Amino acid sequence: MATKWIILAVIISFAVTSLLGKKLIPYLHKLKFGQIILEIGPAWHKNKQGTPTMGGIMFIIGIFAAVVVCLPLYYHETKLIFMDYIETPTVILKLIAGLVMALSFGGIGFLDDYIKVVKKQNLGLNAKQKLLLQFAVAISYLMVVYVSESSYGASYIGSMVIPFFGRVLLPGVIYWPCSAILIVGMVNAVNLTDGIDGLDTSLTFFYGAFALIISGILDYAGLGIVSGALMGGCLGFLLWNRYPAMIFMGDTGSLFLGGIICAIAYTLDMPILIITMGLVYILEMFSVILQVMYFKLTGGKRLFKMSPLHHHFEMCSWSETKICISFCLVMIICGVISVWSILSGL
């Protein structure tokens, strides 16, 4: 029954996002809101200097337009709100709180982009400021999750479902701090992945596709609508962001995508999916961490030609399109394994 609303969510999100590009790109050009290419990046990226950034606004609006239209209509049609045995009030509240969390991360990214682009301060917010704001958002979200679960008598607070193993109950002193670290880490991993044309957009499209499949398997129709909206928004943005990109999503978009990825996993009560389906993002992040550690330990030697990982492959003469396709294939494999593991546990 939810299929038509999922399809409508994909269509609305795609249409709004892609059509916004026609207006927003010339407007950002007019305002001279262009990307500043840092000297530490690949030299050939210099020709991207001035490409409009903050384009994440496009798919944020597109996704929320689809959700605001389709989610209430679906719940109204099926009379599921606060009644359905699967989509309990806890699930619905976690879904709404997750969307607010993603929007809040997007707000942090917007502030960072604004400082870099408008105030002409190349590095934007410093690392300490970003982390403080990000942890504040993550902790606030987890507090809402805790309150929503405890308010409706959930007997599994501080637990998560692990594919193949079932539900595992963790002590709160472990679960909640680790959850905050996982969310902030993943948000920054998605941000680091946004380094070549179309990469983050394509990867997140497939993350949304597999989230949609898992939502269907577990009968989480509301989350299916959100996943469909995510797919449509990414696809609409990809029209403008594919190589050679006419606009970049900026931190506005990448932090938002990181937030919605986490929101999906926690709504499913499967934060482990952040690791299994989001493996490509995590590899990108750890390539940076390992590069820094190796550089310090060896007195200046490099483990990779450049980090994050996509830049290493660029230095190996891979084209941006080849990197994008290859990374997406890895994402698809991770998604298939994740879906298979869930099917095996049913």
Image: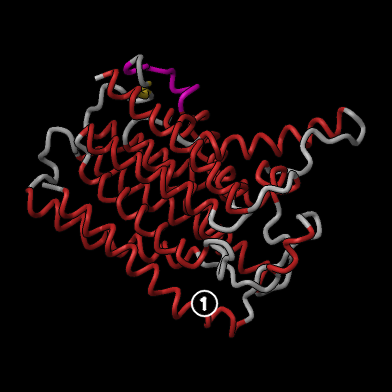
Residue drawn 28% across and 64% down?
A: 12
Give how far across and how far down residue 301 sits, in percent.
Answer: 88, 34
Q: Amino acid at mark 1?
A: Ile
Would you place residue 249 above or below residue 184 in this image? below
Q: Residue furthest top?
A: 165
Of the 4 image quadrants, the one containing the C terminus is top left
Give how far across and how far down residue 64 sits, in percent.
Answer: 33, 61
Query: From the viewer's perspective, is 203 left or right of 128?
Result: left
Range of magenta residues: 166-175
What element does badge 1 sit on? helix
Query: From the viewer's perspective, is 300 left or right of 104?
Result: right
Query: From the viewer's perspective, is 303 left or right of 260?
Result: right
Residue drawn 55% across and 51% down?
A: 199
Give how far across and how far down residue 144 sits, in percent.
Answer: 36, 41
Is residue 173 located in the magenta-colored stretch of the structure?
Answer: yes
Q: How is the image coloured?
A: secondary structure
Is residue 154 located in the magenta-colored stretch of the structure?
Answer: no
Give how far across and how far down residue 106 sits, in percent.
Answer: 49, 57
Would you place residue 189 above or below residue 117 in this image? above
Would you place residue 156 above or below residue 180 in this image? above
Q: Quadrant of residue 267?
A: top left
Residue under label 1? 25
In front here: 328 or 263? 328
- Classify 10 Å Cα crowding around label 1: few (below 14), some (14-19), many (20 and above): many
Query: From the viewer's perspective, is 194 left or right of 299?
Result: left
Residue drawn 43% across and 28% down?
A: 272
In front here: 216 or 183? 216
In front here: 89 or 213? 213
Q: Quadrant of residue 343?
A: top left
